[in-house]
Image (cartoon, grey):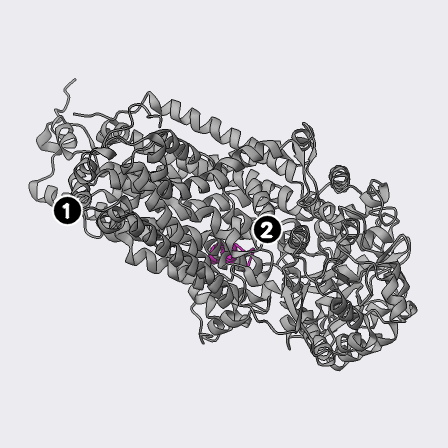
Amino acid sequence: MKYKKWSSLAAAGAMFAGTLGLTGALPPPAGASSVVKLTYDLWDPHEEIGYKASIAQFEKAHPGIQVTINLVAYSAYQTKLQEEFTSGTGPDLFWVNTPWLSTWIKDGYLLPLNKYIKQWHVNLSIYYPSLVSLHSYKGKIYGLPKDWDTIAFFVNENYLAQHHLSVPSKWTWNPTNGGTFLSFLKQATTDKNGVNAASSKFDPNNVATYGVTIDNEAQTGWENFWQMDGCHVIPAAWASSVTFESPACYKTTYFLNELMYKWHVAAPGTLLGSNGEAPSSQDQALFAAGKTAMLMAGDWELTPVTELVGKKFKIGVAPLPSGPDGRWSVFNGLIDGVNPHSKHLAQALELERWLGSPASQKIMGEGGYIWPAVKSLDPLFAAYWAKHGINVEPFLEEAHGNVVNWPNTPGMNQALTDMGTTMGPIWLGSESFSSVTSILKNAYGLANHDLQAAGA
Amino acid sequence: MALAAAEVAPAPQRVLRTGRARQKRSGLSEFLHALPFVGPSMVGVFLFLLVPVVFVIVLSFLTWSGAGPFTWAGVQNWVSIFKFDNAAHSLEVTAYYVLLNIPLQTVLALGLAVMLNRKRRGMAFFRVLYVAPYLSTPVAMALIWFWVFQPQSGAADRFLALFGIHGPAWLESSLWAMPVVAAVNIWQYLGFNMLFFYAGLQGIPTSLYEAAQLDGASKWRQFWRISLPLLNPTMLFVLITDVIGSFQVFDTLYVLTSGGPGTSTQVMSIQIYNVGFQGTRYGEAAALSVLLFGVILMFSIGQFLFFRNRTTYEYS
Amino acid sequence: MSTVAITPSVLAPTPAHADLRQKIFQVSKLTLFYGVLTVVGIVFIVPYVFAVFGSLKPESSILTTPAWVPPTHPAWSNYPNAFISDPQVSTGFGRYMANTAIVTAALTTGQVFFSMLGAYGFARLKFPGRDAIFWVYLATLMVPNIVTIIPLYTEMHYFHMVNTYWGVFLPYALGTPYTIFLMRQFFLNIPQDVIEAARIDGAGDFRVLTRVVAPMSRPVLITAALIAFVFSWNNFLWPLVIMGSQSHYLLTDGLANFNSGPGAGGYLNLLLVGSVITLVPMLIIFIVFNKYIVRSIQLTSGK
């Protein structure tokens, strides 16, 4: 009877394998065409639409190449890519954000492009210089800059008009008395009885509309204020330790806590999700619902915010106020990294060349997806949004002013995550100056630990 | 072929069928014969249960970032988890969760089981109704509860507002976040635990109660003196599984608070996830895992010992 | 001092009053009894009702109307919309459901099949080390899931199975100690004569298992299949850890991820659609297979 047993087992095994066949675990049937398939990883679903349009043009010009876009959630992005690179299955091209830039350069995920830039006769001066230097290390450049963003305020114009307010053209802030920034915010914050925060009759327990939301987030939140008060996260790119253990940092962070819990002009972090980081874009929802007069955000948020607001009110944009050290904004830009072990390196490089070119960036700018890294194309983006009733010039103004890069050093992504968690309490309730100081000191130790673990 | 000791018992039917040649089977051939049956699960248990247990202990002494080489770290990870990863705080928070969750859930489950242990109309209906959440995907339920407990716009605060009460910020409040998480968990598993107690109660012969009734014992006394002691095995089982389950709570907590606000709900499992998969410090995450394992073992052994002397299995 | 004797006859109500008071007492006790059960029942039902209502509300009213108010104009289109594509990702819940179905099918068939083989081996076959190995199986039941997540991930990393379907179900598809334990209990109780009869007819062990024992064991096999199915459908942490691309996400990961990212706050109604979609199969299973579920609880506690 043995043969029967084994044949039954074999039958069962075949059934099992058949089920697995559905999983796509088994390789696709042989006889694939000679078309080269590239994989391209990214995380933003709104920009994806623009990239699809740009890539369609690329595929028309290169009939032998097909590009598959892989959307990966931002929170899983670093891990997923790291995983794939170590097992040799990384994508051909992939977005690179600054928190991971140096780690990935160090680990060899990015192909240096100097040689190809010469071949393609690309003139790097067409791009913003700070973007070129951000993505360069020891003389090698690791990607063609393709976009940039700065931070400013989205403004509910209807609300301001209703309350006869307008954003001061050159407003200032300082950690001591808040400057004209604070006085504006006080007038823009109203309680349920219509009394604004500048009046002594203001009821802080019954606020109807807050002046602004400021998240517990480096890029769209505190790093801007820190920089404006001379407080830096790291002293320079590729630094091996953080440097925010300074009184300026403590004072500025305490100022942010006071905006929320002393003067009640900024929405309390408890409305912004755990730790005040707005992981579900609670800040956008609040703004769209008219619960805040202004939203501190980056220009990539234009699309989701306009979708949320719809026809409810007119959106305006106001630049950040100037701090004791002048007006600064966090300035960031992405590149497409080329996988040095790509099985189709020549084709991947073609795609890199296209996406870094003015032709592709024109498509992205015209469609209002993102500011192109090619300086001369900026008016296209501005024109798109002007047509949709929003003046986005303040973002551009800031790009031409003082800018600071998102901190770039190995391990920074982990450090920023841990800083966010540790600094959470500052957004979630009233804290004294000394407790803000000790919280920041803890964050400092933890951030250094993360940088060391990453071999910075 | 070597014969294994007492385990070789000739199977009579084989003698009948194929004659004396097959009378004694060797240990090895028995093993080979059984291999297709137990082999797959042995591979599974070895690869996916045993090896990980050993490996996590080893990993706690290594440094690994999810890529690249493993380097020796000695006891550094064990120091780091207390210095940087809030291990002590996470253990506290986990213990707090277990304390909020287990006693209340057990008492409620027992109470419901007692109530439903009567021969009244509709008991079966209620039993089925209460168990429904048990199968419901915890992540999906947690999202619904997340929405219910949104500050101001969620159903909970709106409901309180009907009575003029200004509800707290629930999941954003370090005071309320953990109780809400515990409440959601109780909601999810109450019916399931109730079923265990119900099965246990059903197993107690009614003659015992009748005898006690005749002796004039009140319903409360009957419960205390008959039901409860005879439920000890069930109680032990429920408590141990619930406690082990509570120490590992992840899905509901991840969706509701992800460890926040601040670190007020940052239980061990969330920290293991954060440190390992977000922080890419796998060695430290392994140390946290081993620490948690040790605590769970201690608890389980403690519970087992506590109940062992009090368990009555026999009753006349 | 003369004391007024308090005799029972003074205090006792008349028989008619006693009856009425008894009745009122009984009725109010009963009302309280059912009242409590009903209130508890409402607490259990409420989230499902809210979710269904919310999933049918348009974006504009999801944040502005209370959860217990049914939608005035149900936005039925929310369902097909969420299936095909949701604004957060270019893959929709349809894709997540397909992924979950594939993984669940593989995990369930594997787990039931190989557990059945293993349980038969431990229950009915004799081989050296059998009991010791079984005790090891039981011992692993004590290992909490979370403890093995990190090392399992490292293993999958070396097998190159991260971000693959294999990686999600393989750790559970070769038979698990719990299922083997359940089935073994059952198999032990199958009378020896039945097995002998089959053997006399010339059946080898595999045939005995598939032709004789398995058909007799339908209840435990169905229970095991249910346990596996529900486990896989609801599994969250492991798929979260293993899957990277959104097109590979299971329902649970897709749901959790949906709640974060640009504009997520405004798409709450679609999130609820996803929750309802995820919950419906579980509720159907619960209603249809209620008996088996209760039985599995009894089997476990009867240990």
Q: Is residue A57 above or below residue A342?
A: below
The answer to which quarter of the image holds residue A345 is: bottom right
Query: Looking at the picture, how far across and down is residue A235, in whole percent?
Result: 87, 46
Q: Position of residue B120 (x, y in %)?
A: 18, 48
When the figure is inspected, residue A348 is found, relative to residue B207, above or below; the finding is below
Identify residue for label 1: C23
Q: Is residue C37 visible?
A: no
What residue occupies the far top of the structure in this picture?
A: C1
Q: Amino acid at mark 2?
A: His
Q: Nearer the viewer, residue A299 or C250?
A: C250
In this view, A326 is above or below C156: below
Residue B148 appearing in the image? yes
Q: Is most of the magenta stretch helix, strand or loop?
A: helix
Q: Nearer the viewer, residue C135 or C207?
A: C207
Give the magenta part as a residue range.
B145-162
User: For this view, does B48 lie left or right of residue C214?
Assistant: right
Report whether C98 appears left or right of A388: left
- Across and down, in percent, residue B212 comes to 15, 28
The amino acid marked with disc number 1 is Lys
10 Å crowding of disc 2: few (<14), some (14-19), many (20+)? some
The x and y percentages for residue B25 are 29, 32
Q: Residue at x 88, y 58 (%)?
A: A133
Q: Is residue A402 left or right of residue A8?
A: right
Residue tagged by mark 2?
C160
